[in-house]
Image (cartoon, rainbow, N blue to C red):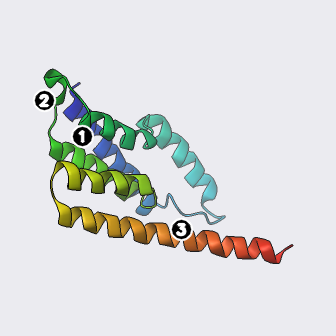
């Protein structure tokens, strides 16, 4: 299997995962469906055999390759799409925003796109920061 095929496979899996999470109720934690959702997770995790957490590191490795026989197996658009699919799947993983923004800026020389991605990442980080602050206030009130 070529690197391009692996990248395409990861992107397709990310789309499947996102569809499950957003369209098929994968994020529905209500008591009446949670048991069915848990079993669906088990089925899908066995099928997918992929850890999205490796995607960001894999994309970084791809950009550091030296051997032409290896790096000729894919193009930069593949890396862009891989990183984009990781952001779609993990909207609050700031590392993905950082990697894609750096890729757009340093590799693709696309400052405008890099800025757009950075601003999106900053907004997501702020949202999570606010959630953490709210939780901290709740915990501190209980003291």
Figure check: 57 above or below 134:
above
Who is closer to the viewer here, 104 or 15?
A: 104
Position of residue 54 in the picture relative to residue 108 (left or right): right
Marks 1 and 3, how far apart at CA: 30 Å
Who is closer to the viewer here, 71 or 24?
A: 71
On the image, numbered disc 2 is attached to which residue?
72
- Residue at the right extreme? 143
Q: Looking at the image, do the residues carrying marks 2 and 3 touch, with CB atoms under 8 Å apart?
A: no
> Which residue is rendered at x = 66% and y = 64% of the image?
31
Position of residue 24 in the picture relative to residue 10 (left or right): right
Quarter of the figure that contains the N terminus: top left
| Mark linked to residue 8 | 1
Label 3: element kind:
helix
On the image, numbered disc 3 is attached to which residue?
128
Whole-percent x, y for residue 76 in the image: 16, 43
Figure check: 141 above or below 85:
below
Whole-percent x, y for residue 103 in the image: 25, 50
Q: Looking at the image, do the residues carrying marks 1 and 3 touch, with CB atoms under 8 Å apart?
A: no
Position of residue 123 in the picture relative to residue 28 (left or right): left
Q: Earlier in the sequence, mark 2 or mark 3?
A: 2
Marks 2 and 3, how far apart at CA: 39 Å
Q: Earlier in the sequence, mark 2 or mark 1?
A: 1
Label 2: element kind:
loop
Quarter of the figure that contains the C terminus: bottom right
> Which residue is rendered at x = 48% and y = 61% of the image?
25
């Amino acid at each position: 299997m070529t690197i391009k095929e692996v990248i395409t496979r990861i992107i397709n899996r990310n789309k499947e995962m996102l569809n499950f999470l957003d369209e098929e109720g994968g994020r529905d934690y209500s008591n009446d469906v949670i048991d069915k959702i848990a079993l669906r997770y088990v089925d899908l995790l066995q099928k997918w055999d992929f850890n999205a957490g490796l995607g960001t590191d894999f994309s970084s490795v791809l950009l550091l390759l030296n051997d032409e026989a290896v790096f000729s197996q894919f193009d930069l658009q593949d890396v862009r799409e891989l990183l984009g699919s990781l952001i779609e799947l993990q909207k609050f993983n700031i590392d993905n925003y950082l990697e894609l923004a750096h890729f757009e800026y340093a590799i693709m020389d696309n400052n405008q796109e890099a800025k757009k991605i950075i601003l999106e990442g900053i907004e997501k980080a702020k949202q999570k920061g606010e959630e953490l602050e709210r939780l901290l206030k709740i915990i501190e009130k209980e003291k």
